[in-house]
Image (spheres, rainbow, N blue to C red):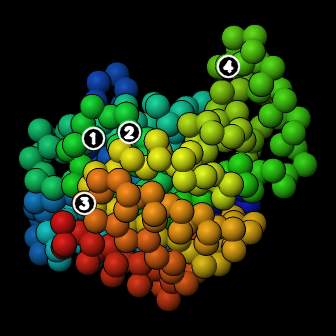
Amino acid sequence: RRYAYGRSAWPLSDLKMDGRLIRFGEKNRQLLAFVSLSQCGAAVCKNALILVAGLTEGLLSMEYTQLLSKELSSRDYSLVQVNLSSSFMQFGISSLKRDCQELTELVRALKETYSFQKVVLLGHSTGCQDALYYLRHSELASALDGVVLQGAVSDRDILVLEETTPAMLEESVSLIADAKGQKLLSKLFLGAPITAERCHSLMGRLTDDDMFSVDLTEEELRPILSPVKVPILVAFSEQDQYVPDKEKQKEFAERMDRVLRGSSAASVTVRYFTGDHGLTEPRFYEPFVDSVCKFVCEI
């Protein structure tokens, strides 16, 4: 996934989940979400946790999805997996702004149409940028009751090591200067077409996507993190393969923690979990799922 994508197929039995597929937003948009059913019956739970995956990912991409759904159900939370316009290989022709608009429509539907009481947003990888962008820009930011960030990493920090980055960044800057930001670059990115604006956002400094780069100062982090008014759990991975400098990231995590505690966030938990970027093994993701369940129970 992300910069080394591709995975072996899972057995079909491992992919089975029971739930309801719902459509939300404008009818011509065909935005879909999968709402897990309660483990004790056919009904959904009274609260919802939205899972937003990262680049090249979407429904059922995370190894912890099924366990998370099961454990949340026993806490009266239904897991909601969302299929955004940017899901899977469509990320290059979308943006955080568009994700925010679609997540706003989903939260509105969950609250108004389906009458969920509490709604929590869990972002993985680029889903973390989605979560913070939502809190900063959505008209329904106050409708969220909590936020979880899992695998929050910088695209810029890892992409600076790629040989193709300078040329792609130069091309994107040139197109944007010519008012052609929505034009596709001449090369694919992660096997997908990408616009000049999205490429620049992923590779540039202090762009929309640039929220977790290790060189960001506390002053630069404040406008990114100050909109967090709800309880937040930030889960970093000790063996994250997309973090080039682990020590610098730990220093960044400390700055992030200080800025969050200096804001008006209801509660702040920043911690490291043993495991890789996506917590891909049970010994990695089981402690994380336990922490998420504890987190939602305390909201």
User: What is the spatial separation of the Cα atoms under label 3 and label 2, in whole angstroms?
Assistant: 16 Å
Residue 213: image quadrant is: bottom right
Residue at which label 2 appears: 136
Name the foreground residue: 249 vs 145.
Answer: 249
User: What is the spatial separation of the Cα atoms under label 1 and label 3, in whole angstroms?
Assistant: 14 Å
Let me know if residue 61 appears in the view. Answer: no
User: What is the spatial separation of the Cα atoms under label 4 and label 1, in whole angstroms?
Assistant: 28 Å
Judged left or right of residue 280, residue 14 is: left
Residue 98: image quadrant is: top left
The amino acid type found where label 4 is placed reads Gly
Name the foreground residue: 73 vs 266.
Answer: 266
Residue 181: mark: 4
Q: Is residue 20 above or below residue 11?
A: above
Q: Residue at x 83, y 26 (%)?
A: 171
Of mark 2 and mark 4, the one earlier in the sequence is 2
Secondary structure at numbered mark 4: loop
Secondary structure at numbered mark 3: loop
Of mark 4 and mark 3, the one earlier in the sequence is 4
Q: Nearer the viewer, mark 4 or mark 1?
A: 1
All told, the count of numbered labels is 4
Query: Where is the C terminus found, in terms of image quarters?
Result: bottom left
Q: Residues within 10 Å of mark 2 (few under 14, many from 20)?
A: some
Q: Is residue 212 above or below residue 227?
A: below
The amino acid type found where label 3 is placed reads Ala
User: What is the spatial separation of the Cα atoms under label 1 and label 2, in whole angstroms?
Assistant: 7 Å
Q: Nearer the viewer, mark 1 or mark 3?
A: 3
Q: Are marks 1 and 2 in contact (CB under 8 Å)?
A: yes
Residue at which label 1 appears: 141
Of mark 3 and mark 2, the one earlier in the sequence is 2
Of mark 4 and mark 1, the one earlier in the sequence is 1
User: What is the spatial separation of the Cα atoms under label 2 and label 4, in whole angstroms?
Assistant: 23 Å
